[in-house]
């Protein structure tokens, strides 16, 4: 309850929560206390958590940051929510986010922007900006986020916390509102790699309700945290240290790499030659999938419905025009266009071919090295309101989105500051190398 008081006192300014679920949290806390009094031992029982408002929570508003779903109460829980509640964790509320997870600054939310707790004139990153800010502000020790093209790692970097995007398929997407289904993946955001390991262990695993979740044993993610790094081979992709990288970010990342050398790791340069194609390929594939996923918001079955429609066509048109914000509309238009007959081969098919090349770049690099390291974002957190055109916002994602296209895991770890604003070191690994990433991150912390 002291955290709930803290949120109610301080979040008016930061705006990291869309909904605070005080009563539910207090009764879950009582239940956890009673279970503990009866001698039951569940390691996560009683620990508070914040949940990105993209995860369905039964009987609680699940808005996805959109006016479209402002009135939507999910009739069921997402698998990850179910798992965390079964582990005894206590959800404090639902966190702010860019509408339908489209954005890199949390400024695309129907519920208003979130301020970065380290510097309230800066953005917290996005789209999981509310989750990152809630952890950084000490409102919750951990949070759930989602990452379609960087939305866990970039806000973690901007807010000075640790955020892990798992391998595609490691965590169930059931009950996670879909943006781009072949890229979306939920994951933990917390103050340390160790806390992320606890949370990942609780949410990972096969789910019969998500056909892309992978039937593979969930390892004990804590087991390897203390493995020494002597002999670890670290690759630095030269494309991640080129033009456009802020000098303070670069020097913080180079300092972090020196720390790894002092721990016995070997560092070499590698190349990911198709890096420059990642942003264009992603901004074809993600909107294409989004345009299909978002067609379900028609004003009929759930979500916002316009007043007094004259006919069905009018109902669709006005409900969607009123319910979606500008960025979401832009993506639906782009996606509908690139999927349309006559343009499909030139855009969508081409982008899928490029995706294959990008994935191959990583596979080739991992023949030579164990992990890759670089910055999570080209700059520290930028000022609220600073990026006015969509393309400059999309360029925020140059170091994060190739990872989603390849399906590999990535983690962002705090690695210093530029003035008051945190900088994140990104560490990338092979498919299902989460234990190794957590180990490498933990040794730095
Ligand atoms: N910034 C990217 C976008 O706007 C990624 C978002 C995400 O990972 N959900 O699409």
Image (cartoon, grey):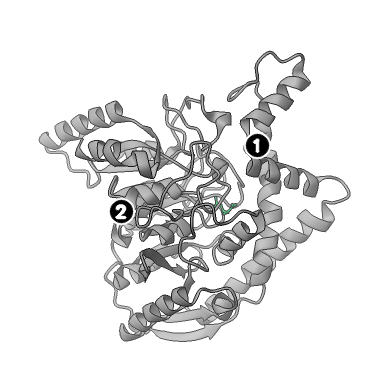
Residue 53 position within the rendered picture, expressed as x and y whole percent measured from the top left: 46, 38
Q: Are marks 1 and 2 in contact (CB under 8 Å)?
A: no
Is residue 406 visible in the rendered structure shown here? no
Q: Residues within 10 Å of mark 1 (few under 14, many from 20)?
A: many
The quarter of the displayed image where residue 275 is located: bottom right
Q: Which residue is mark 1?
A: 294
Above/below status of 255 relative to 436: below
Residue 82 position within the rendered picture, expressed as x and y whole percent measured from the top left: 38, 36
Q: Residues within 10 Å of mark 2 (few under 14, many from 20)?
A: some
Residue 46 position within the rendered picture, expressed as x and y whole percent measured from the top left: 22, 40
Residue 249 position within the rendered picture, expressed as x and y whole percent measured from the top left: 45, 73
Q: Is mark 2 within 8 Å of ligand 1?
A: no
Identify the disc placed on residue 307: none
Q: Which mark sits nearer the N-terminus, 1 or 2? A: 2
- Numbered label tally: 2
Q: Quadrant of the C terminus?
A: bottom left
Above/below status of 114 relative to 381: above
Question: What residue is rendered at 50% in x and 52% in y?
Answer: 126
- Label 2 residue SS: helix
Q: CA distance from mark 1 to mark 2?
A: 33 Å
Identify the disc placed on residue 198: 2
The quarter of the displayed image where residue 240 is located: bottom right
Q: Nearer the viewer, residue 41 or 410?
A: 410
Question: What residue is rendered at 51% in x and 49% in y?
Answer: 127
The mark closer to the camera, 1 or 2, is 1
- Label 1 residue SS: helix
Question: What residue is rendered at 42% in x and 54% in y?
Answer: 121
Above/below status of 307 relative to 317: above
Q: Is residue 147 left or right of residue 12?
A: right
Q: Quadrant of the N terminus?
A: top left
Is residue 439 visible in the rendered structure shown here? yes
């Amino acid at each position: 309850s002291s955290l709930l008081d803290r949120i109610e006192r301080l979040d008016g300014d930061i705006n990291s929560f869309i909904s605070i679920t005080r009563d539910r949290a207090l009764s879950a806390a009582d239940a956890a206390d009673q279970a503990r009094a009866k001698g039951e031992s569940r390691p996560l029982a009683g620990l508070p958590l914040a949940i990105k408002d993209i995860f369905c929570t039964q009987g609680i508003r699940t808005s996805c940051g959109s006016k479209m779903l402002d009135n939507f109460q999910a009739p069921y829980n997402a698998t990850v929510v179910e798992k965390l509640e079964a582990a005894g964790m206590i959800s404090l509320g639902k966190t702010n986010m860019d509408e339908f997870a489209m954005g890199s600054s949390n400024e695309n939310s129907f519920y208003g922007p979130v301020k970065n707790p380290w510097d309230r004139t800066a953005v917290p990153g996005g789209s999981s900006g509310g989750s990152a800010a809630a952890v950084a502000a000490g409102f919750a020790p951990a949070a759930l986020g989602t990452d379609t093209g960087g939305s866990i790692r970039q806000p973690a970097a901007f807010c000075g916390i640790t955020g892990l995007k798992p391998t595609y398929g490691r965590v169930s997407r059931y009950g996670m509102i879909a943006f781009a289904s072949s890229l979306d993946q939920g994951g933990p955001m917390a103050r340390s790699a160790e806390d992320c390991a606890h949370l990942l262990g609780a949410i990972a695993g096969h789910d019969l309700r998500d056909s892309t979740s992978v039937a593979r044993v969930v390892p004990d993610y804590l087991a390897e945290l203390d493995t020494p790094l002597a002999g670890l081979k670290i690759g630095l992709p030269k494309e991640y240290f080129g033009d456009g990288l802020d000098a303070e970010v670069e020097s913080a990342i180079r300092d972090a790499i020196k720390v790894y050398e002092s721990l016995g790791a070997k560092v070499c340069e590698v190349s990911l030659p198709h890096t420059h194609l990642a942003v264009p390929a992603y901004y074809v594939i993600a909107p294409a999938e989004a345009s299909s996923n978002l067609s379900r918001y028609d004003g009929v079955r759930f979500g916002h419905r316009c007043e007094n429609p004259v006919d069905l066509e009018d109902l669709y048109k006005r409900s969607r025009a009123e319910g979606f914000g500008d960025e979401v509309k832009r993506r639906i238009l782009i996606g509908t266009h690139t999927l349309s007959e006559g343009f499909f081969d030139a855009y969508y098919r081409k982008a899928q071919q490029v995706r294959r090349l990008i994935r191959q770049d990583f596979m080739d690099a991992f023949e030579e090295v164990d992990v890759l390291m670089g910055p999570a974002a080209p700059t520290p957190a930028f000022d609220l309101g600073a990026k006015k055109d969509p393309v400059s916002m999309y360029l925020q994602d140059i170091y994060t989105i190739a990872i989603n296209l390849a399906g590999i895991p990535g983690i962002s770890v705090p690695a210093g500051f530029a003035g008051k604003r945190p900088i994140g070191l990104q560490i990338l690994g092979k498919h299902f190398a989460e234990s190794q990433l957590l180990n490498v991150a933990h040794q730095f912390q």
